[in-house]
Amino acid sequence: MAVRLKDIAEDLGVSLVTVSKVLRNKPDVGELTRNRVLQRVRELNYRPNMLARGLASGKSYTIGLIVPDLVHTFFAELAKGVSAALRKESYQLILASAEEEPGLEHEEIENLLARGVDALLIASCQSSAAGFKSLVASKVPYVLIDRHLPRLNACFVGTDDVAAGRMATEHLIRLGRERIAHIGGELISTSEGRLTGYKEALAANHIPFCEELVAIRSRLEEEGVQIGNNAMSDLLKLKKRPDAVFCYNDLTAVGAIRCLLASKLRVPEDVAVIGCGNLRLSSYLEVPLSSIDQSTQKQGEQAATLALSLIAQKHKQKAKHLLIEPKLIARNSTIGRTV
Amino acid sequence: MAVRLKDIAEDLGVSLVTVSKVLRNKPDVGELTRNRVLQRVRELNYRPNMLARGLASGKSYTIGLIVPDLVHTFFAELAKGVSAALRKESYQLILASAEEEPGLEHEEIENLLARGVDALLIASCQSSAAGFKSLVASKVPYVLIDRHLPRLNACFVGTDDVAAGRMATEHLIRLGRERIAHIGGELISTSEGRLTGYKEALAANHIPFCEELVAIRSRLEEEGVQIGNNAMSDLLKLKKRPDAVFCYNDLTAVGAIRCLLASKLRVPEDVAVIGCGNLRLSSYLEVPLSSIDQSTQKQGEQAATLALSLIAQKHKQKAKHLLIEPKLIARNSTIGRTV
DNA sequence: ATGAAAGCGCTAACAC
DNA sequence: GTGTTAGCGCTTTCAT
């Protein structure tokens, strides 16, 4: 079968331990022996059995990442960032998708713990901290990404969602819009943050907050287009229709634009639309979409780096929060054709 | 630390082996003992240490999937299909991305083998079979997905690319187009298949194949939009411009449409455009894009199922090829506004 | 600088 | 039905 430490040791007439030491760069090996070992390792294309190493050492050199949905580009980009950062440290990524089901997410947490991951990164679809009990009990370090659970005193890397909401809304205000609607989500921290930012921007500009202009929907991650379309349609039924709308994410915005164009309204002349997330597709659309960029890949990298530092430190320190500043990307859906 | 078999065994005053047997549903355990064990397992929230189980049994209940790029929706959907099929059999997916670099792909293969995966699924970005040497030597079963390596006698699940090319081209022919261009890729089997299909369709309809109408480019997966744009621009420089174009993938088609609209040409009136892959974004675009659907998620599921069957069977059988029939999805970019 | 012994948590083969 | 013994391939500790 595969080459083992023992094989190399016997080949060379040294002990297995010596070979093991060479492979882990321990200093207490003679130069000559070290070279002979290295040579043979290369010849035989030896690779340590990570299961055995993990079992013996208690470290698997593996980090788990759980996302709610891989097909949502945001999470794929996140994964890409994580993977890149880990590769540099020769850690490996084990990726699991929870398919937006809290039950599955909990399952996957348990699975990854059973696989001995050294740390866990979670973009959670849970709405409560209850599902994290066994994770907390396991003492395995973990970092929440993108979505924060208020009741959980955990490390977190994500967008400054309040700033994102504020930024988007202020952009619309500066363009002279006065009836600014919001299509938002519910329960998760990102939705709440963006809504708060929306309200703050209105307040700062002395525009009264108007309940009827806010449409809260669920499942915006999975069926954003359809739901954005419907929500916009509802907003258009108001006696006085909005002249701008800040959408929770880009898919929702695509749906909203769909609805507006179908209703013979012009974007942005009649209604300006801005999304959030700045997905790659944003610039290919019927009306290129203004959006809030979240530096997604960078978030993944930072989360991975944070996790590695948690693994390295012996004693628990207090939970770190890393908020990434969002950036406004203005395109036709708010500022119209540029010359 | 974590609960172990031994803890449960001592708690109950039975032997560790008995507990192990219960957990693996072995029949030779008394009903009473079995229930007592199960009860305690639940109480303590015991989870077997998979590293230890893997080491002892030689099976990790893990399957590796290597894709060229996670952010490309096609591969994310593939991963989703794989993950779904594995979950049913309580296998776990370890996902790795090769970032379109053959070197990295080879690294990841080695990594996953070292982690003891029971099988490997690879959507390869290699252009030769050389990188598979250690994989073949390892005897670990594997399945190629989407992209086939001609020199490698391996199991394969993917689109019938020749049919896809034929189908797309015939669609354009039936719409009365006569100068049909193709923007295609190089080196990998999917490109070659689609080009072959394109030629076959022309031949079957007595349309002469015209070298100048074929633009071969590389990196169509990563920068499809930009490259499609440029390629289309080149095609428009011909004395007699094409009246239709079949693009290797949807991103390339988006780029081509971009270029056409920028050149004041109408899609599909002046030039009809069809892509391949039927990404979700296809229907959100400026001009909703006709495409060839590849049932991507289903491909992932089938590949996973095939891999599981390879694991189950003791003796090597001859390599199976599963070709998924593509489906034509006609939208505005070829058939124009429907009433 | 090198190696012998013990053991990580589990399964496999075989006794009782 | 149940338990005993060995060992998976590696790391760790501690002698030498």
Image (tube, coloured by chain):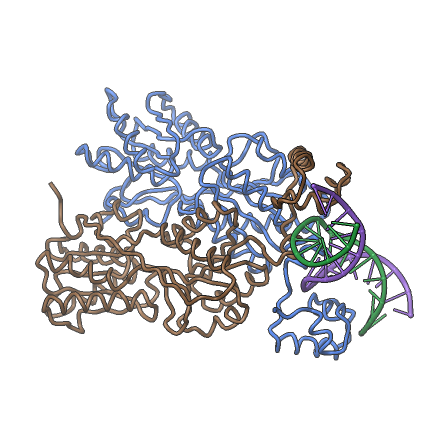
Chain colours: A brown, B blue, C purple, D green
Vertically, is B15 above or below B142? below
Q: Is residue B261 rendered to the left or right of residue B64? A: left
Residue A222 appearing in the image? no
When asked about the image quadrant of residue A242, the answer is bottom left
Where residue B320 sits in the image (x, y, percent)? Answer: 61, 41
User: Front-most of A309 and A334?
Assistant: A309
- As drawn, is B257 to the left or to the right of A266? right
* Residue A255 spot, x, y in % from top left: 26, 57
Residue drawn 43% across and 53% down? A305
- Residue at 44% across / 46% down in the picture? A84
Image point (33%, 21%), residue name: B212
Quadrant showing the N terminus of chain A: top right
Q: Residue B100's x, y, as percent?
A: 45, 38
Name the one closer to the observer, A256 or A140. A140
Measuring from the top left, give residue A115's x and y in whole percent: 59, 59
**Occupied quadrant, residue A36:** top right
Q: Is residue B22 visible?
A: yes
- In the rendered image of this protein, does residue B85 appear above or below residue B285? below
Residue that sits furthest to the left in the current view = A176
